[in-house]
Structures are given as structure tokens and as C-alpha cells.
Amino acid sequence: MAMQKVTLIRGDGIGPEVVDAAIEVLDAAGAKIEWEEVLAGLAAHTLSGDPLPDEVLASIARNHTCLKGPVTTPIAGGFASINVALRKQFELYANLRPVRNMPCVASRFEGVDLVIIRENTEGLYSGLEHEVTPGVVESLKIATEKACTRIARFAFEYAAANQRKKITAIHKANIMKLTDGLFLRCAREVAREYGDLVYEEAIVDNASMQLVMNPARFDVLLLENLYGDILSDLCAGLVGGLGLVAGANLGLRDAIFEAVHGSAPDIAGQGVANPTAMLLACLMMLRYIGQEDVAARIQQALVKVYCEKRALTRDVGGASSTRQFAAAVIAALA
């Protein structure tokens, strides 16, 4: 198999630590990847004044596949979100986040097997804001028929291809009758083409309650941008937290794979971060680029380390370092 060139963004905070640990595992497992590293986020902003330099965009445009560590997004000021900018630049319209229990990891629920599919390019999360007059600001929620239909079709095609049974469209159309109403109309139209799949709808606040009471009643969740951002983190909490969940941002030609947790500057440099989410992002990426066998070997080793409860990091009840955890996964490779 030929080498696959992949853009690499190590990120900020704990990003370089978890990315380096994951790459060690990929190398040991025989992944055929040639990394092209670029700098983005707070580190790039500190160095050049630009958190998203042109060379980052050029690299992703060349390689079409990117592995990204967590990058810092300033709160209530500073530069705009790098994640949002990349999704818009490459029209990565679908955010895909599987949420499943990690074997042998205790969590609030067992048997969780959810897929979150989130529209990634519009809605309130896009951050289209301006000051109307001093003391008054306005945030715009944009919904288009094109984007709503596109993400609905992605969800139904994903469900059909992956033996899923049901799709639930999450909305607030009882209040936002135009924007969320459009989202639902598009989902209903696409649903008519997939008679073998169950389609239902749930208001976002009620869906939140149902998820924390009985997540097994859901299968594939289809959400607009902001609801998807919130509920995907809620669902991660059902299986042990953001350290055990990964995500993919997918477009027609390009894809960015990432751990979904933050840069955690409070523990950066201590070598204690759990690289599991980054490894799971790597597994999604390996399958995307056709290296399924390597992904399967790493997944088996990861499960073995968790079930033998050796070399676990402190967030899952162990006392091992990031590198010790990675070394244990490498030792467990079949």
C-alpha cells in the first residue's frame, strides 16, 4: 500500500502530547502515513500573529486529509475559532461523532451506541454577530435548504450504509418556526426516500432529558450546528467524558479528524493527558483512507489495555503517564 500524505496540526496545550503519543502507536502498527506538519491556533498566533496561516490551508487543500490536535479558542474576545474557520473554508459540512462505551470502562450507562451527525457550516454556531448599537448585539441564525438537505441526506446514507435503524431529527421548531422548521422539512423530504429507516423528531430540550434517562432509545441523531455541539458533549458524558470520544469533519473532498476535547492548558506539559480520544480519531482517519487492517489492530490493542487495566491514565482511574499509556498500547498490538 502506498504512503498516504496527511496534514498534521499538533495543536495547543496538551495537543502535542496526545498527538505525539497517537503517532507513536500508528507508527508501531505499520500505518502508511507521511505527515506534513503545519502550525495553527494559539501557537501560530504567538509566532506570526496569524492563528490560521495560509500554509495550513494550502496543506489541507493538497492532502485532503488532516489530523488535528485541540487548538485554543479565546473566550469572549481574541481571534475567531480555528475549528469554525476550517469547516467553512473546506465546506466540511458534516460533523460525525460516534459515541460508544469503551469496553471495561465504568460509566453511567452500558450499551450506549449513538451516532451524532451535526450540520457544520451554518446556524447560530457560525458566529455571525455584530453590535447594533452600544449595549445591543445581534447574532444571526442562518439556515438554507441546501445545507439542511445535504446534512439530512448524509445522515440517511450513513445510517443505511452502517446498518443503523433509526434517525431522530433534533429541533426547536416550536419556537424557531422558520429556521428549525426548514431543517425539519428538509429532513422529512429526504426520509421519504429511505423507507427502511425509522424517522422521528424530538424537541431539543426533551431530547436532552431523554438522553440522560435512557440513551438506548436513540440511534442516529441528526442536528443543526449549535444543538449538535451541545448534545454531542452531553452524549460523551454518558460514556465517560470527552477523553473517550473522537470526531470527523467531512466534506465532499476534504476531511479533518480530531479529538473533541479542549487543549486543557491547566495540565499541559505534565504528561498526564489521556491520548485515547486522539487515538480514536486516528482510527476514524485510518478507515477513511482505506487502512482498515491497521485500525482494527490498534482498536484491539486499545481495548486490551483498558480491560487489563494496566497503564491507564488518571482520568480513568490509573496513574500512568501519556507516554506510558501509549507504550502499553504498542506492547498490546497483535
Image (cartoon, rainbow, N blue to C red):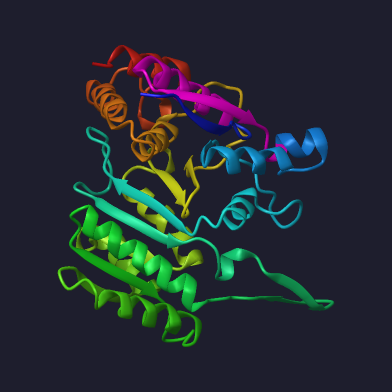
Any magenta on residue 22? yes
Locate residue 225, reporting x and y percent: 49, 65
**Which image quadrant is residue 205 in?**
bottom left
Residue located at (50% from left, 81% from top): 179
Locate residue 246, reporting x and y percent: 41, 42
Relative height, residue 327 to residue 183 (above, below): above
Which residues are the magenta region?
15-42
Side (left or right) of 65 relative to 85: left
Side (left or right) of 193 relative to 35: left
Residue located at (33% from left, 72% from top): 169
Any magenta on residue 16? yes
**Which image quadrant is residue 152 in?**
bottom left
Q: Which quadrant is home to the C terminus?
A: top left
Locate residue 294, reporting x and y percent: 31, 25
* Viewer-closest of 149 and 106: 149
- Number of marks present in the image shown: 0
Residue furthest to the front in view is: 2
Locate residue 155, reporting x and y percent: 33, 62
Relative height, residue 285 to residue 193 (above, below): above
Residue furthest to the left in view is: 196
Side (left or right) of 137 relative to 285: right
Q: Is residue 249 in view from this perspective?
A: yes
Q: Which quadrant is home to the N terminus?
A: top left
